């Protein structure tokens, strides 16, 4: 069931009302609505093909919706591009992380927005980028021996942390995470869970996460929504549901599809 639409100009960081996305004859999203409150963590669950990635691309300005309305900080907004979304404080960290393995940590954090010295010859101000990178990592509690290390020498969890730190440093207020714990062991997943909770504790960051692991999602999120076949079929406060309840909803859907 989709959430009831709240009035325009409300206090949510992000709101989507009745989003439909069609690709020719295929309907990828069929009337999806969501809200993301200020300082809230929302877990978006669903199997492959449920429409989660399509929704994420719309919220980041990568694709336009076919119909429906988006509100950013209470203002109705038509996102024209990824850069437009970033200018409004929306950043996304995808599964591939978009990191350059051979470059240092601090160069990755400033990728495509490098700091240069003033003047006709645009020389990189490595000292300032190094200082700001270390300051940002320290501020959000990411402990790396040196920001001079190439990214290829980092673990999977450390790479994810660097990608998140880059988004934070760009002054993101709405952070969208695409499977932030994918293919991680317990120790690395714990590192990222701690990082996400520290970001939330600052109070000015709203986070939506695409997830597959129900137990991890319920541990991190304030609210969860379950997507199936392009629709939101269940929504609840995380503390008011359980892995067993979510699994039963999925099983019922699977049985209904088999019967059909």
Image (cartoon, grey):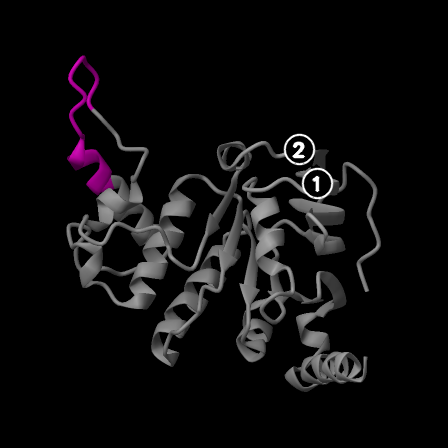
Secondary structure of the residue carrying tag 1 is strand
Q: Which residue is mark 2?
A: 78
- Label 1–label 2 contact, CB within 8 A: yes
State whether residue 210 is above or below residue 19: below
Whether residue 24 appears in magenta in the rendering, the answer is: no
Q: Earlier in the sequence, mark 1 or mark 2?
A: 1
Tally the numbered discs: 2
In the picture, measured across the screen, residue 252 lies left or right of residue 134, that is right
Q: Nearer the viewer, residue 251 or 33?
A: 251
Residue 15 locus on image (x, y percent): 70, 46
In the picture, measured across the screen, residue 206 lies left or right of residue 152, that is right
Residue 73 locus on image (x, y percent): 66, 38
Whether residue 122 appears in magenta in the rendering, the answer is: yes
Answer with the quarter of the image where residue 85 lies: top right
Q: Could you tell me which residue is drawn at 60 percent across and 45 percent down? A: 59
Point out the image quarter for the C terminus.
bottom right
Specify the segment rendered in magenta: 117-131
Secondary structure of the residue carrying tag 2 is loop
Answer with the quarter of the image where residue 78 lies: top right
- Magenta stretch: dominant SS? loop
Point out the image quarter for the N terminus.
bottom right
Q: Could you tell me which residue is drawn at 53 percent across and 44 percent down? A: 173
Q: Residues within 10 Å of mark 2 (few under 14, many from 20)?
A: some
Q: Could you tell me which residue is drawn at 80 percent across and 84 percent down? A: 259
State whether residue 164 is above or below residue 194: above
Q: Residues within 10 Å of mark 1 (few under 14, many from 20)?
A: many
Going by the picture, which residue comes out furthest to the front? 25
State whether residue 114 is above or below residue 156: above
State whether residue 161 is above or below residue 135: below
Q: Nearer the viewer, residue 185 or 227?
A: 227
Q: Which residue is mark 1?
A: 70
């Amino acid at each position: 069931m989709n959430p009831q639409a709240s009035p325009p100009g409300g206090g949510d960081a992000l709101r989507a009302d009745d989003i439909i996305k069609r690709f020719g004859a295929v309907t990828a999203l069929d009337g999806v609505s969501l809200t993301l409150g200020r300082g809230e963590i929302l877990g978006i669950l669903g199997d492959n093909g449920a429409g989660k990635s399509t929704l994420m691309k719309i919220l980041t300005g990568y694709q336009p919706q076919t119909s429906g309305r988006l509100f950013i900080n209470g203002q109705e907004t038509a996102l024209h591009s990824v850069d437009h979304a970033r200018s409004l404080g929306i950043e996304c960290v995808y599964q591939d992380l978009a990191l350059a393995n051979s470059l240092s940590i601090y160069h990755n954090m400033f990728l495509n927005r490098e700091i240069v010295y003033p003047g006709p010859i645009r020389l990189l101000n490595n000292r300032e980028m190094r200082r700001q990178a270390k300051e940002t990592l320290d501020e959000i509690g990411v402990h790396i021996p040196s920001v001079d290390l190439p990214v290829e020498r980092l673990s999977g969890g450390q790479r994810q942390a660097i990608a998140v730190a880059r988004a934070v440093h760009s002054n993101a207020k709405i952070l969208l995470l695409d499977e932030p714990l994918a293919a991680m062991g317990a120790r690395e997943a714990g590192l990222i869970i701690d990082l996400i909770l520290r970001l939330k504790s600052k109070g000015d960051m709203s986070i939506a996460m695409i997830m597959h692991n129900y137990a991890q999602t319920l541990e991190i999120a304030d609210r969860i929504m379950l997507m199936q076949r392009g629709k939101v079929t269940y929504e609840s406060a995380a503390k008011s549901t359980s892995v067993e309840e979510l699994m039963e909803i999925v099983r019922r859907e699977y049985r209904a599809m088999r019967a059909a």
